C-alpha cells in the first residue's frame, strides 16, 4: 500500500539532517565538535534588527499579507537601487519571501509545464532544493555537472537541442554553493541572450550576492562592467529574469526566514496570486526587522570581514595538505579535494574525520554522484578554525 507518492518516497534524507545526527552522536560522547557542515554562521544578530523585531511584536496577532508591508518593500527597492542600480520601474516586480528556500521550491509549481516545457536545469553540485522542486512540480530535473573547464558555470547553449527547447527555467547560482565560483559580466550577458532566444526563465539564486572578499569594500566601482562585487542578472534585463535574494547570509537571519523575489513584473504579478495559496506570508514583526536589515550595509560589511578572515586563515593549511587549489571567488565555503588515500570515498572520509571532531559535508550530499570533494562552511570562529586545521592536518598525515 502506498501512503505517500513516489516523489516523497524517493526523497533522500536531507543532507543537513544527516549532519546533525552525526554531530549529536559526537556531543553525546563528550567530544569537542568543530562544525563546518551547515552554512549557518553563528554571528550574533545586529542589535537594531532584533530591536525592530521586538518592538513590532503586536498585542493581537493578525494574518500577514503575502505582498509584504510597504516599509519592507520600500527597503528592498532601495537596496536593489543602491547595490545594483536597479530602478523601480513598472517592468520589475518585487515580493518578499519567507527566506529563499520556500521561494526556490515553490517557483517550480508556477513555471514547470509552461508552453509544454518540463525540464528544470540546475547546477550540480548545488543546492538540493532545485531538484526537489522539479520533482514535486511534476517536471524533469536536468542537473548540469559543473567543471573547472567552464569555471563552474552552466553553459546551456551547449545542452542538447531538445533539452534547450523543453527547458521551462534554469537555475543559476553565483556566487555558488558549494564551490564559491562567481560569474562575469560577459557570462551573464551571454546567458540572458540565450534565455531570451530559447524562451527560458532565468532563475538566479543570489543568496550569496553580498558575501564577497571584504577588501573589495575599500574600492567599490558601481559600473557593472568594472564592479568586482557579484552581479545579479536583473542588472542586465528584467525580461524572463527573476532573482532570489536572502537575508540569511547577508545579515545572518537564517532563523527568521526572510528574503525576496524580484524581476519580470509579468511573472511576479502572477506568482503573487499563486503564493497567496502557499501560506508563505512573513510575520509582520519579521518584516519590520527585515526592513532594517536591507537598509543597512555596515553590519554586512562587518560580516564580510569575518568570513574573509576565516577563509584566509584556513586556506593555507588546506593548500599545504594538497586539498585546495585556489581561493573561492566569493561566498564563505571552501570546496576541497578529499585526500588521495580516500579517493572516491568522500562519505567514508568525512565520517572518519567527524570521529575526530571535525564536521564537513561530502560532495555526494551536495551533488548527484560526485565523490571526490568535501565542503567547509566557514562557520566556526577563528580559534576553532585553527584547532580544526590542526585536527585535519594530523588526520591527513596519519592516513597518507
Ligand atoms: C545556494 C543556496 N540557495 C538558497 C539557500 C536558502 O537560503 P534561505 O532559505 O535561508 O534564504 C541556501 C542556504 O544555504 C543556499 O546555500
Image (cartoon, rainbow, N blue to C red):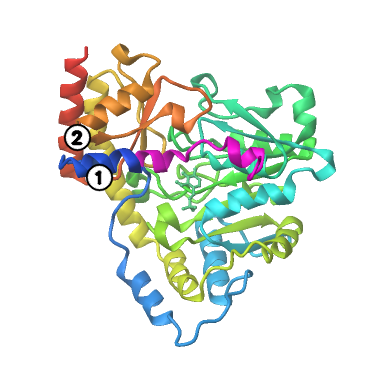
The residue where tag 1 is placed is: 380
Q: Outermost residue toward the front?
A: 1
Front one among 115 and 294? 115
Q: Compute the Cα span from label 2 to label 1.
A: 9 Å
Residue 47 lies in quadrant = bottom left
Which segment is the magenta one? 1-19
Q: Residue at x 40, y 65 (%)?
A: 296
Callout 2–callout 1 Cβ contact below 8 Å:
yes
Instruction: Look at the image and tell me in which quarter the C terminus lies.
Output: top left
The total number of labels drawn is 2
Q: Outermost residue toward the right?
A: 115
Q: Is residue 104 above or below residue 200?
A: below
Q: Is residue 389 left or right of residue 329?
A: left
* Residue 220 place in picture, x, y as percent: 42, 50
Q: Is residue 291 left or right of residue 378?
A: right
The residue where tag 2 is placed is: 388
Amino acid at each position: 500500500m502506498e501512503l505517500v507518492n513516489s516523489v516523497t518516497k524517493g526523497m533522500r534524507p536531507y543532507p543537513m539532517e544527516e549532519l546533525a545526527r552525526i554531530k549529536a552522536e559526537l556531543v553525546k560522547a563528550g567530544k569537542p565538535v568543530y562544525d563546518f557542515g551547515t552554512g549557518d554562521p553563528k554571528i550574533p544578530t545586529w542589535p537594531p534588527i532584533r530591536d525592530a523585531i521586538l518592538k513590532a511584536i503586536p498585542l493581537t496577532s493578525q494574518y500577514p499579507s503575502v505582498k509584504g508591508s510597504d516599509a519592507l518593500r520600500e527597503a528592498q527597492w532601495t537596496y536593489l537601487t543602491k547595490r545594483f542600480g536597479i530602478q523601480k520601474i513598472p517592468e520589475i516586480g518585487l515580493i518578499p519571501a519567507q527566506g529563499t528556500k520556500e521561494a526556490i521550491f515553490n517557483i517550480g509549481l508556477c513555471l514547470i509545464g509552461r508552453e509544454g516545457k518540463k525540464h528544470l536545469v540546475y547546477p550540480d553540485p548545488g543546492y538540493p532544493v532545485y531538484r526537489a522542486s522539479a520533482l514535486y512540480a511534476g517536471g524533469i530535473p536536468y542537473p548540469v555537472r559543473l567543471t573547472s573547464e567552464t569555471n563552474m558555470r552552466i553553459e546551456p547553449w551547449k545542452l542538447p537541442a531538445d533539452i534547450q527547447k523543453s527547458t521551462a527555467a534554469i537555475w543559476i547560482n553565483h556566487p555558488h554553493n558549494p564551490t564559491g565560483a562567481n560569474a562575469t559580466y560577459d557570462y551573464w550577458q551571454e546567458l540572458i541572450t540565450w534565455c531570451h532566444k530559447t524562451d527560458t526563465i532565468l532563475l538566479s539564486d543570489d543568496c550569496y550576492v553580498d558575501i564577497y572578499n571584504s577588501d573589495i569594500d575599500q574600492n567599490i566601482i558601481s559600473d557593472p562592467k568594472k564592479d568586482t562585487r557579484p552581479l545579479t542578472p536583473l542588472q542586465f534585463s528584467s525580461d524572463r529574469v527573476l532573482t532570489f535574494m536572502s537575508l540569511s547570509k547577508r545579515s545572518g537571519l537564517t532563523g527568521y526566514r526572510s528574503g525576496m523575489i524580484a524581476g519580470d513584473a509579468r511573472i511576479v504579478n502572477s506568482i503573487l496570486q499563486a503564493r497567496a495559496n502557499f501560506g508563505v506570508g512573513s510575520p509582520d514583526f519579521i518584516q519590520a526587522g527585515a526592513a532594517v536589515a536591507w537598509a543597512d550595509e555596515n553590519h554586512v560589511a562587518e560580516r564580510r570581514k569575518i568570513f574573509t578572515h576565516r577563509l584566509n586563515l584556513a586556506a593555507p593549511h588546506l593548500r599545504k595538505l594538497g586539498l585546495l587549489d585556489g581561493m573561492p571567488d566569493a561566498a564563505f565555503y571552501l570546496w576541497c579535494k578529499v585526500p588521495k588515500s580516500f579517493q572516491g570515498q568522500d562519505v567514508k572520509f568525512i565520517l572518519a574525520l567527524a570521529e575526530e571532531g571535525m564536521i564537513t559535508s561530502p560532495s555526494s550530499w551536495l551533488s548527484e554522484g560526485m565523490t571526490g570533494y568535501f565542503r567547509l562552511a566557514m562557520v566556526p570562529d577563528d580559534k576553532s578554525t585553527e584547532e580544526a586545521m590542526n585536527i585535519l592536518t594530523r588526520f591527513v598525515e596519519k592516513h597518507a
